[in-house]
Amino acid sequence: MRKTKRVTISDIAALAGVSKATASLVLNGRGKELRVAQETRERVLAIAQQHHYQPSIYARLLRENRSHTLGLVVPEITNYGFAVFSHELENLCREAGLQLLIACTDENASQETVVVNNLVARQVDGLIVASSMQSDSDYVKLSEQLPVVLFDRHINDTRLPLVITDSLTPTADLVERLARANPDEIYFLGGQPRLSPTKDRLAGFMQGLERAGVTPRPEWIIHGNYHPSSGYEMFAALCARLGRPPKALFTAACGLLEGVLRYMSQHHLLESEIHIASFDDHYLYDSLSLHIDTVEQNVPRLAQDCFEIITQMIEGNEPAMPQRVLPATLRWRHAQ
Amino acid sequence: MRKTKRVTISDIAALAGVSKATASLVLNGRGKELRVAQETRERVLAIAQQHHYQPSIYARLLRENRSHTLGLVVPEITNYGFAVFSHELENLCREAGLQLLIACTDENASQETVVVNNLVARQVDGLIVASSMQSDSDYVKLSEQLPVVLFDRHINDTRLPLVITDSLTPTADLVERLARANPDEIYFLGGQPRLSPTKDRLAGFMQGLERAGVTPRPEWIIHGNYHPSSGYEMFAALCARLGRPPKALFTAACGLLEGVLRYMSQHHLLESEIHIASFDDHYLYDSLSLHIDTVEQNVPRLAQDCFEIITQMIEGNEPAMPQRVLPATLRWRHAQ
DNA sequence: ATGAAAGCGCTAACAC
DNA sequence: GTGTTAGCGCTTTCAT
């Protein structure tokens, strides 16, 4: 099996009785000043064809200084939103002749460092990252070397190119209604308190309460991280503390909700009266027994914008509008 | 921004006042016969460090004839099962120092050809494929060039290395119970009739009916393809034909079920009496208002086995047990 | 209209 | 101990 010696351009040049240079010209269809005789051209092409000539991409990449490769770093590819993002981005890349390299961090900063280093070592032309880091300093440094675009999460007021969904407004809308229906008890389950999505969504939560005329109690705000297991644990602890499930709940991301739902189904709480709202949507939410109001991000648009920005940067241009905040859509599932 | 001229091994060799060869030895820690003076070693290392020397991976890859890269081709990364598979495989790859290249086919044979060609042009060391093709002939040909492992789907009795989940037995078990509860009407929604999962699951369906003593009617068997939209359409057509939802239904894959659920929620059918069973599980099924019995594949195991086989082949060995059929688990959600 | 040769950055065989 | 050299496969001047 295999070990079929590679057929190189020298081989087909020799077989066609021309020089490597001529062969190269022909094979790359440099039709501009194709000063190569029609007849030679056909001969070379024919030989290449019948020997299944495949240019060595690595020899080529060694010359130009581009890898025609884009790195994507996400917390979890099994998270539906990131899967949709990856899918969209992959299509854009394919059309543009780029290869997408996807790496997952499992919401883990040290693993993030590892995978980013791998991608940089692979000489990706650009990097698109949904970071789980507390600070953007690594990426600021990196961006001196290559184009970096952050998305989904806004770390410490970074000035790096960025595409996120507006969290505050829609969260406030969602929570306002939640609070009007349940003024006496409404919990917030969030990720790391220093990550921007958490902060923004918490701000939205507060604003929603205020609009509904509800005064928040400190014990309503609970932080963990964005891993589903964290959602499970926060919710389990909460139920233990209360001796029952909470009356109303807002989860700041779909991973957290995943953990909550898992706990609820394990403890047969799905028929209870709990009123849930969440950031992030999923197609299966339409079929749940619980009616969950959500904020749906425009994920394809997120991907398109990231792609647009990174391509501009790779071309060497300053990107137009390097920091973008996209609007979200509310998905109401509760009877009003 | 960027365009920082690459610092090469020649540069640091010059700066350290040694030859490229020495520098190369030191930087690769070829400690075996490290006949390089301790002092020189430190000097080189120091210089490399402070100039952030990063070896050009493409120069290296050009020499060895390996890309340290694995290609994965799946129908849809947004399909939960394939996302889990990718995630698992990515971890295995990272530990082994490989880069995983993921490409999606959208269940589309011609797109599959395109992405496979891309990956081959990228000189992946091996290819792991869940194919949507009708025939394995392309892959048989390809496998003369590089190691290919198929998974999830068994095309036309291929003799290529293969890892799949046993469909027949668990489907029969599932359907038997379904048929005992609903002997007079039970539909099968499947993908392309010539794909192995469809055939095996249909065979399991038939066996289940037989065990339950139910005689199948020809109109119960409906074929489409594995795209969710196909599930939606088949189910819509069925409802239209019957003038009501069917009493019992088996869907042959989670993508199809996705389409069915979408239709049901749009048409407010989620509270109806329909009895559903399906191949493939999803964590959210525990939280649905419908109780859906499923066959759960051992996806991490699937990924591990594919990885094991492909690595063996890349090393040049014949893989042990090149065709593997893994057992599945039944997930009962209906009261018995 | 075509060929010769240099060079992308790296490693390894073989000197010295 | 360390340096010289060739070569991986390709593209691109610059001659001819």
Image (spheres, coloured by chain):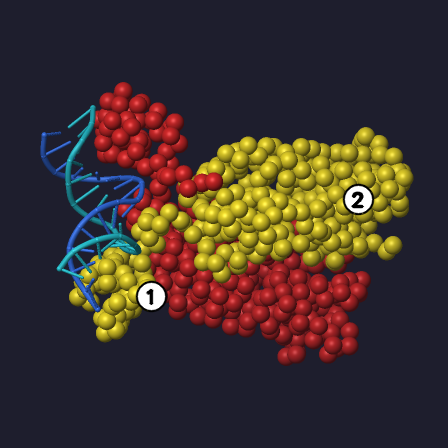
Chain colours: A red, B yellow, C cyan, D blue
Tag 1's secondary structure? loop
Q: Nearer the viewer, mark 2 or mark 1?
A: 1
Badge 1: chain ID: B
Pick the front one: B170 or A2? A2
Pick the front one: A11 or A303? A11
On screen, residue B42 above or below B262: below
Residue B308 appears at what percent x and percent y? 55, 53
**Residue on which disc 2 sits:** B172
Tag 1: amino acid: Lys
Q: Is residue B106 visible?
A: no
**Residue on which disc 1 sits:** B32
Residue shown at 49%/68% (left/top)? A109
Residue B19 appears at what percent x and percent y? 19, 61
On screen, residue B332 above or below A185: above
**Which picture quadrant has residue B242?**
top right
Tag 2's secondary structure? helix
**Which picture quadrant has residue A9?**
top left
- For label 2, the crowd category at 10 Å Cα-Cα, with few meaning under 14, some 14 to 19 and many 20 or more, is many
